[in-house]
Image (spheres, rainbow, N blue to C red):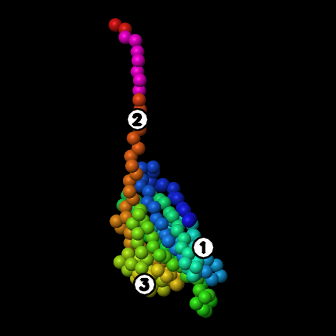
Amino acid sequence: MAETILNDVLGTEALLSTIVLRLSGDHYNGAPRFQLYVDDQPVGEAQTVSAIRSKNEWQEFVFTGAFGADGPGKVAIRFLNDAWGGAADKDRNLYVDSIEVNGVRFDAGDPTHAVYERDSGQRLFGREKMSWHGTLTFETKGAAPVPPEPVLDTITVRVSGDHYK
């Protein structure tokens, strides 16, 4: 499992969101690479998927950051390095099973939440397989971060003194 923790740019009072991606890939002349975007902003560095789809392997990537009090409105996965060698066994693809935002799961196969937009502009709904360069975007409104339990500190002060007059 890969994990990226982002600096909290909003201060220590900000709520942190956790995003978990469940990915796999077809490897041809290298593994698939992706970049995560939250509300149209890149998050961390580009990542490499080592899980191999034909072996039924899945890999989780975990990202934690301050993405607003209501959590992220959009989470997008950009497929960076598509490759095609002219045959089905010579094809690099990225597969997205699901994402989880603050404990709420969004399946890539659900057309009400996920849209895959190819670089050509074609939009495909409810698709797990990313066969071409493009971005799979999830609408994630309603997955707000859960505030942490308050920490209560106890301070005990003992005072003693002499009384004069």
Camera-side residue: 76 or 25? 25
Q: CA distance from mark 1 to mark 2?
A: 48 Å
| Residue found farthest to the top | 165
Residue at left offset 40%, top offset 12%: 162
* Amino acid at pointer 2: Thr
* Amino acid at pointer 1: Ser
Which residue does the numbered mark 3 point to in the structure image?
124
In the picture, the disc for residue 86 is: none
User: Who comes first in sequence, dot 3 or dot 1?
Assistant: 1
Camera-side residue: 54 or 156? 54
Q: Which residues are magenta?
A: 157-163
Q: CA distance from mark 3 to mark 1?
A: 25 Å
Camera-side residue: 70 or 151? 151
Badge 2: residue crowd in 10 Å (few <14, some 14–19, many ≥20): few
In the picture, the disc for residue 50 is: 1
Q: Position of residue 16 (x, y in %)?
A: 44, 57
Instruction: Say what secondary structure mark 2 lies in.
Output: loop
Residue at left offset 55%, top offset 82%: 93
Instruction: Say what secondary structure mark 1 lies in.
Output: loop
Which residue does the numbered mark 2 point to in the structure image?
154
